[in-house]
Amino acid sequence: MRLVTGIYAGRYPEQIDGWRILCEQEKTPFRLTTEPDCTVLLCEGETPRWLEAFMSAGGIAVLSGVRPEDLPFSTDYIGAASLDTADFSDFGEGIAQIKSIIQVFNGDGKGTLCLHEKRKIKSGLHPDEYPAVLWQTVGKGGCWYTGIPLSELICALGDTLRATPNGAGYSERITAIDKHLLLRVMRKLLVSAYEKRGLPYTYLNYYPDNYRSVFIFRVDVDGVYGDNLEKISTAAKQAGIRVSFYVNQNLCQPESERLLQIDPSHYIGCHGREHNLYTTEAENDRNIRDCRQWMRQLGLPEQPGFVAPRGMWNFALNRALENNGIRYTSDFGYCIYDLPFYPYDHGKRMAVKQIPVDPFSTERAYVKAQEENTEVPENYVRNRFLDTIHNQYSAGMPIILYSHPQYFGSLAEKVLPVIEAELEQLNVWHATMEEFDQWWDVRDSAQYTASWEEQSGLCISGELPAGVYVQTEGGKPNVGR
């Protein structure tokens, strides 16, 4: 039996873009389909006429963003609700910001939707709480289903000032939707679908050489601030950390000669001429092109990396980056804490990948303290970075930290050695953004098929580049070729 995930290709391709992003991140075999020719079926909104027959014969589906009329069975439908959050604690992912109109169902399931958000619990009563995701058996198979448009939310635009979803009490202007948490829930539903069929779920290793995570330290150079930039460069080199610096032209111009003090062991990329995002492709194009030209004239190495000013992102920026030969960007206004992925624009995969980052920065912590007339506690920055390291490592996700020279420069000599000492105890690949980008390209190029036979087990065939191998949820399997 060929193991392949089918994504139902209905009338609205943008609805399934999030499912495509997940399957591409995982590098699990998948295809768009309009026929019942797959092992597991993923749908968003629309469902096929043959869905009931598919499940009755033993097929398993994951259905997101569905309405009661999309389902081939009766439901206890509650109605539409406008909710800010969904509680995915049953999936091990906590509370996710969703900001969406969703369809609410009652029944057997996991997670919690609370129709009365931010209310105190009185007399131990929890009125109008319903499962976020429900299970329904149909014949020999069945489906997970939810009224939350999980897939469409992955590509939704919009950022806002809010608390970061890590419980640290830190706020930043980040993506309005916790896409990283939704993707983790979507992955768990997909894996569960294969488990319910009694079949292995296959995907490719996220990092080379059996590493559990990757560590990258990024510095957005929004001004040199005297010796602070050089302090970061020197402290990082002494600690064995290669920093990925991104230079903004206008904010660095008064002290531009100091940019040449960045040690050659580090990576230098572009952070735009103006420290802002533009609405049009042409304006974004000029902002990128002018900065790169200025960097060349200054004698800085020309690199194909970019991070957006203020963490802001839009489709016009991504197209402008492609025009300039940029391969990746990293913007917390679009996604945080996750694996790299290629955004989709209304059903079309874009050429410039997104590499999500932890949105905490030393500078924002200091600004927040000033706004609240408080002080940044001693060792707060160090502990905040260490928390992210352990949280991301535990989840097997990338550890990408960032700050700026303004305040972190004076802390670098103390903080970076502590970070490195902690990382030495973990199975982590030290990389620059450029190296991680290149690795992801290699991994993305892999082509393979997976099949399962009761007698011979799991069989893999195809072209896997050096360092890339097939995993199952249980780890690296013994497979035939």
Image (cartoon, rainbow, N blue to C red):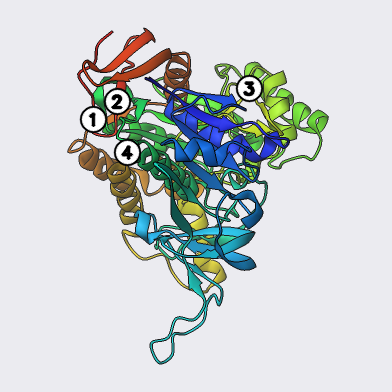
Nearer to us in this view, 251 or 258 = 251
Q: Residues within 10 Å of mark 2 (few under 14, many from 20)?
A: some
**Label number found at residue 82:** none
Callout in the foreground (4, 3): 4
Going from the N terminus, do you reach mark 3 or mark 2 first? 3
Residue at numbered disc 3: 351
> CA–CA distance between discs 2 and 4?
15 Å
Cβ–Cβ under 8 Å for marks 1 and 2:
yes
Give the image location of residue 345, x and y in percent. Answer: 70, 33
Give the image location of residue 169, x and y in percent. Answer: 43, 66
> CA–CA distance between discs 4 and 1?
15 Å
Callout in the foreground (3, 2): 2
Placement of the N terminus among the 4 image quadrants: top left
Nearer to us in this view, 479 or 26 = 479
User: What amino acid does circle 4 point to?
Assistant: Glu
Nearer to us in this view, 297 or 455 = 455
Give the image location of residue 454, x and y in percent. Answer: 24, 21
> From the viewer's perspective, is 77 left or right of 12?
left
Give the image location of residue 217, x and y in percent. Answer: 40, 36
User: What amino acid does circle 1 point to?
Assistant: Gly
Residue at numbered disc 1: 475
Identified at 35% across, 18% down, the residue is 451
**Label number found at residue 471:** 2
